[in-house]
Amino acid sequence: MGFANGKIAAFFLSRRARWALWIPVAVGVGAGGYFSLRAEPPAWTGALCLALLLAFLAPFYSNKKALLAWLPVFLAALGFAAAQLRAHAVAAPVLKYATPATVFQGRVLSVERQPEGFRFVLGDITPQWIRYSWGKRYAMPAAARLTSRLHQPPPEAGATVRVKARLLPLPPPVLPSAYDFQRMAWFSGFGATGYALGPVGTVSPARGGRYLLAGLRAAIYRHITAAIPNRDAAAVTAGILIGQRGAISQRAWNDIRLSGLAHLLAVAGLHTGVVTGWIFFFTRLLLAAIPYVALRWPVKKIAAAFSIPAALFYLGLVGAPLPAARAVIMVCAVMAAIIMDRDPFSLRLLALAATVILLLRPESLAGASFQMSFAAVTVLIAFYEGTRGWWSGLYQDRRWFMRAALFVLASMATTAAATLGTAPYALYHFLSVPLLAGFIANLIAVPIAVFIVLPVGVCACLLIPFGLDAVPFKIVGGGVKMILAVAAMTARMPFAAVHAASWPLSLLIVITFGGLWTCIWQGRARWFGLLPVLLAVCLIPFAPRADVLVSTRGALFAVRAADGKLWISPGRGDRFVRREWALREGGATPSPPVSCDAHACFYKARGHLVAFVKTQSALAEDCKKAGVVISAFVIPPASCTAPLVIDKKKLRRTGATALYFMPGGGIAAHSVFAARGRRLWTPRVYR
């Protein structure tokens, strides 16, 4: 069957108006391909691929069939090249060894308040070199993220400070499939973490206009905390208005997360849309109230033009997080469409925003923020695109109380659609999805945020120079207290959320492409996209679970109990690793499935005996009995004849390791460094 006569070809040709919506998908495939490599390709790889593809453009240009085959390959190569260029552009030294306590001086690049103390990024660090006890000197990173738990006012962004601190290398993932903090830090521009051992002293204040918005953000935060005495209410208010949510207590944050209200603290489309929408509305209202202006000037277009710089200013004020950047790109496109008398609401705007972000910040593709933000908006636009006529028919010529009921119904539908769209990504990254609790909480809390917190909060910020902000901020604080009360109530409801253990990225990719097929195409064929989604969802509970986990240091291990939960070896160290293991592997059990003595612990499952050796004296005997020997010290190769030996020396080469006992009797070992390969952001660090 010819190209033009085939049913598949006819389907795609009849929907050529939707082809452009797949542009960010192709770019994302290329960027994702770069990040999935196990070895860093030569720096010229992306540029060479683009050059070769451009060279083939001339012969393909006159042939539409060939051009259609060439275009997605070119877009994927463009995404690959953008990711590679970005990875090399942000390259900076990374700390390999923990430093001794040292007095460091540098410039504060950013500050984030915490429930106890504050966290800040220190750049332009001096001294630039540290000599270690073994006689070698190593370069310090260009920036480091430090935590101070002392009760002192945090320094201003841009100020030069001096602090006695200890710097630590960036920790690798706690499991082969866990969150990659090293990659995040690489693209965020800092090469070490650490903690302050003394007060942070200011050497010189911030100068110049580079940190003007950061200073404005800090001033607004001070006014918020002065007007709202409740610490959690003040912290949530700061999170909603200016994106400063670090000071929220753990209990309040857990309530917000479990109730499905965390999106209120991620400055994104809701915040940007409400702020610019109110500015657009009041500007248009003010101009329309002047008869001369209303009769002679295009009031709507003027209000739209005024909203664009307002949206850009708001983006800078909140620190330009990724969801806000996506929202501002879309808002600017919407306002430009209003100015040019075009339809401002379509998936094309979302495709434009996604393409721009993927080309400028391709590393965001792997983050929960990008995935959940675009998933929610994609599902919402597709949902209302398909049901717009039905909603319009219901709304027309209805009395006020019917319109109010329809507004509530639309709010419920919006909440359900957004929850459905973000559910796979929330389950993958955070291992839980709010159910009825999230539905009820959003139905109550979102109107409070839209009609009270955000508009009154913006007015309060504008009234700060006149000293009239206290009352509006108190009103905002009252609204936030209602949101916190809703979160606390719904988070404790029975079956408030669905929880799951970690599951493979491949299933998330299948769900994503199935969802994109359903949302982008139109007609009956779109529903074929639900088949891979349902198949992947059904496979999630059957994802393989590791039988044995070993930490990077080897001092912490965990084994799978008969009930499917982990038993984690006791101790006080590696608290973060313990928490992550329990969260990602289906919870922890207090009942030990191991037998221990003073020299070793033994674990037996599926015909395998694993020995966790504590002392050198027990090594020879344990190596004869066990098929797997694990220790936190170095085992000489000739001293142990066990088939599989994992010791301190090996763990330094492999990182944290997960062992899977296969049905046929074999053992599969998955390690962090093998899963990630050798990339720019995967240094071998020694903590």
Image (cartoon, rainbow, N blue to C red):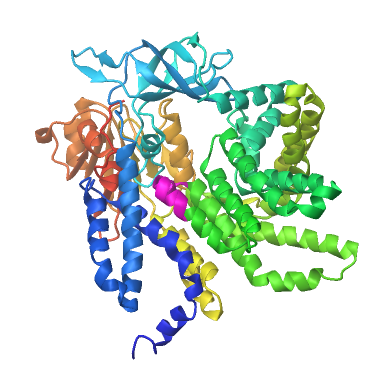
Horizontally, residue 335 falls left or right of residue 94, namely: right
Report whether residue 536 is seen: no
Image height check: is 454 above or below 441?
above
Horizontal side of 151 relative to 300 (left or right) equals left
Q: Is residue 272 magenta?
A: no
Judging depth in this view, the residue of 601 and 421 nearest the camera is 421
Residue ID at (33%, 78%): 65
In terms of image quadrants, where is residue 647? top left
**Residue 169 seen anywhere in this rendered image of the structure:** yes
Quarter assignment of residue 458: top right
Q: Is residue 663 above or below residue 68?
A: above
The span shown in magenta is 355-367
Q: Nearer the viewer, residue 468 or 201?
A: 468
Q: Nearer the viewer, residue 551 or 182?
A: 182
Give how far across and how far down residue 317 sits, in percent: 59, 33
Q: Is residue 174 left or right of residue 203?
A: left
Quadrant location of the N terminus in the rendered image? bottom left
**What x and y, as percent, mark residue 630?**
26, 37
The picture places residue 672, in percent across and down from the top left corner, at 30, 42
